[in-house]
Image: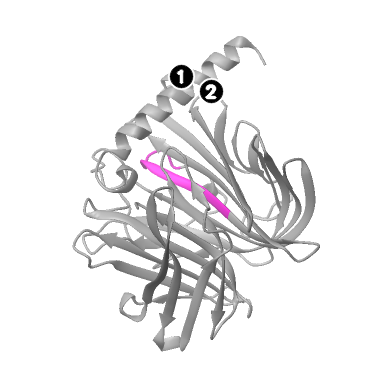
Amino acid sequence: MSADRISRRVFAGGIAALALARRAAAQGYAGLGETADGFARVAPGKLFTFPADHGPHPEFRIEWWYLTANLVDRSGAACGLQWTLFRQATQPGPQGEGWANQQLWMGHAAVTRADTHRFGELFSRGGVGQAGVTARPFAAWIDDWEIKGSEQTDDRTLSPLTLKASGTDFSYALTLEADRPVVLQGDGGFSRKSERGQASYYYSQPFFRARGTFTIDDKPVDVTGQAWMDREWSSQPLDADQTGWDWLSLHLASGDKLMLYRLRQKDGRHYPFGNWINADGRTQMIAGNDIQMTPKATAEVAGRKLPLEWQIAIPSRSFSIVCKPLNAKAWMGTGFSYWEGPISFVGTHDGVGYLELTGY
């Protein structure tokens, strides 16, 4: 690698870290409650079009391509992985050329087993090709981390794809396949985040079947399982008084899927929301007053007390489960730190999923 390449990477990472740190000190978790004057607004009634909406939306301030996978190796031991690409604009307006581009890119990758959690982080400035997303053939990358399609990738299912990432002490490479279309979250893809109008555009592919190789400390194992990819973009997804969120993606043994979150507010009146996704891909919103998310046990992680065991109930569906983490130490000590890790659950329904906790 050339000295020029190294210096530009360091420069890009430094600029990105500085800008993101400034936003972290702003309103709400990671500055997501900051006002977004000049950026595009999220409104109900959007008509989603694919493959275009698989690609970037630079007129909005922030978006992400977010994948988690619940896996098992040949012995049946559980493990999980995360791959995330974030885009954030430092200012609205026409896109600058090259190093003057106002888009910042950040990648997170992690692997989790019961006995260990490893993660990595990458930064890039937009406009120089080091990171980006294309809609067709679909590809999202930062350095050599990538989710990639081909001419055979179906725009409706966003499948098949290949996925890879690596850190100093871990790596993974998977193939992802799905036979059902992506699903729109919220009200036709309009995902309300507060009673004051904050919202995002949000869709998911929760039906990925995953297979490939999972490596920790140069010891590869073959793995199979289920993966869930989320796509969201917005310009102000949180209100200023919302401090973070507790989010779950659940793969039920029945084949149904469930997405739940509660946005925590300073006054204690947390804002819950959910979508039930039937095994055939049909979705139904779950009213906030029908969602009970109750922390049952906490653990001390990275100097923070985190609610890692949850009682989840949806009375209208006679749904009641208890979730527990595979590894309580699944802390992402990245520029914006948070907890993200695989979980399992039992009760009226059994299965596996992922839990994310931010703002603690």
The residue under the point 76% across, 52% down is: 212
Quarter holding the N terminus? top right
- In depth, the one of 177 and 27 nearer the eye is 27
Q: Is residue 181 left or right of residue 272?
A: right
Instruction: Give the x, y percent position of residue 58.
Output: 42, 38
Amino acid type, mark 2: Val
Q: Which residues are magenta?
A: 57-67
Direction left: furthest residue: 267
The residue under the point 25% across, 43% down is: 34
- Quarter-of-image position of residue 45: bottom left
Specify few, some or many for label 1: CA neighbours under 10 Å numbering under 14, 14-19, or 20 or more. few
Answer whether residue 61 is magenta in the image. Answer: yes
- In depth, the one of 96 and 128 nearer the eye is 128
Marks 1/2 in contact by CB < 8 Å: the verdict is yes
Q: Is residue 67 left or right of residue 144?
A: left
The residue under the point 31% across, 37% down is: 23
Secondary element at tag 1: helix
Direction top: furthest residue: 3
Please state the total of marks drawn on the protein image. 2
Instruction: Give the x, y percent position of residue 6.
Output: 58, 16
The residue under the point 42% across, 44% down is: 337
In the image, is residue 270 above or below residue 33?
A: below
Answer whether residue 297 is magenta in the image. Answer: no
Secondary element at tag 2: loop
In the image, is residue 79 above or below residue 99?
A: below
Amino acid type, mark 1: Trp
- Quarter-of-image position of residue 132: top right
Instruction: Give the x, y percent position of residue 301.
Output: 44, 52
- Mark 1 or mark 2: which comes first in sequence? 1
Q: What's the mark number on residue 128?
A: 2
Q: Is residue 109 visible?
A: yes
Q: What's the mark number on residue 99?
A: 1
